[in-house]
Image (cartoon, rainbow, N blue to C red):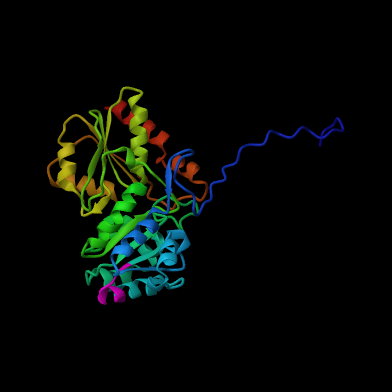
Amino acid sequence: MSTTGKEPAAAPAKKRLTTSAMIASIAAEGQATRPAPFGHALVELAKRDERIVGLTADLGKYTDLHIFARAFPDRFYQMGMAEQLLMSTAAGLAREGFVPFATTYAVFAARRAYDFIAMAIAEEKLPVKIACALPGLTTGYGPSHQATDDIAIFRAMPDITIVDPCDALDIEQAVPAIAAHDGPVYLRLLRGQVPAVLDAYDYSFELGKAKVLREGGDVLFISSGILTMRALEAARALEGDGIRAAVLHSPTIKPLDVATILAEVDRAGRLVVVAENHSRIGGLGEAVATALLANGRAPRFRHIALPDAFLDAGALPTLHDRYGISTDRIVERTKGWLEED
């Protein structure tokens, strides 16, 4: 209490981060976005292909499948909070000639429904497309909802393709591509207001192909998902310091486009940095490192990924900075590695 008899002046209010932990957009303030690219792309595909059906485990709104449900209510199935039932039903529909898109959160598909996906879908090579929101660190709700190990889990499953799109354009083009693929696909889904990044580049999605988005002679970023967006931002920032960074976007994690990766790594003299929104265990970084060593390549190699840990809850900007996948942290770490060399 103040000894003057007056209440002390209140401290200036600090600006609070108001990012929703569950459904926060990963778009930066003022960044161009497109709403629900997955939902809209699936509707457009379903107009042309009567085999397309949609299923969800009580998460239509949070995987953008509600857009499909409004357009095609007779081809939409709400399975409730039962991922095992979701995947088994999708397998049954695939056996009857449909192309099911099953949506849930990535943690629930990877951890809760793994055996059902393995036995009912992957072993049978059925064309079920598993589109899962909240991949990696795209929610602040903590370990129960952060799918930081989903790629590692599905990379170990035979006969399943893994796609990690960067932005709205990637998703829009990936949807018909994975539907046409004769086999199961796991898609790491960005939902809601999704950044529009790749429109500025001469880019088109091809299943199984990595694409060079930007040239540079000092650093080669090999990235997937939202870390391609961050790698592009970091490359522009590094350019201000005279550092030229290339970006190779690898939206398909399995099968990996080893030929393109080797061709880019063979351009000597560049620091190779793999950047991913996933644990450093079992993801893109390990896949690239294995491919390099198996083919006799040993470049200067560094890895930007999430730690092998259960991550904190909180606002996404804070968490991305804390765990090293924000643009500023990528720039900082890349400069440090170049100075070491």
Compared with 242, 92 (above or below) is below
- In this rendering, would 24 be left or right of 46? right
Residue 96 shown in magenta: yes
Q: Where is residue 114 drawn, in percent x and y?
A: 33, 67
Query: Where 330 sits versus 184, above or below?
Result: above
For the C terminus, the quadrant is top left
Please tell me which residue is depicted at 23% across the width and 43% down the height of the picture: 211
Q: Position of residue 58 (x, y in %)?
A: 46, 68
Image x and y of residue 68, in percent: 40, 63
Location of residue 118 (image quadrant): bottom left
Looking at the image, is 255 positioned above or below residue 71?
Answer: above
Q: Is residue 236 above or below residue 87?
A: above
Q: Nearer the viewer, residue 103 or 318?
A: 103
Q: Quadrant of the N terminus?
A: top right
Q: Quadrant of residue 11?
A: top right
Instruction: Specify whether residue 114 is painted magenta.
Output: no
Which quadrant of the structure image shows residue 31? top left
Judged from this view, the residue extending furthest toward the right is 5
Toward the viewer: 39 or 235?
A: 39
Residue extending furthest toward the front: 47
From this viewpoint, is residue 151 visible? yes
Residues in magenta, as a range: 92-100
Q: Nearer the viewer, residue 224 or 304?
A: 224
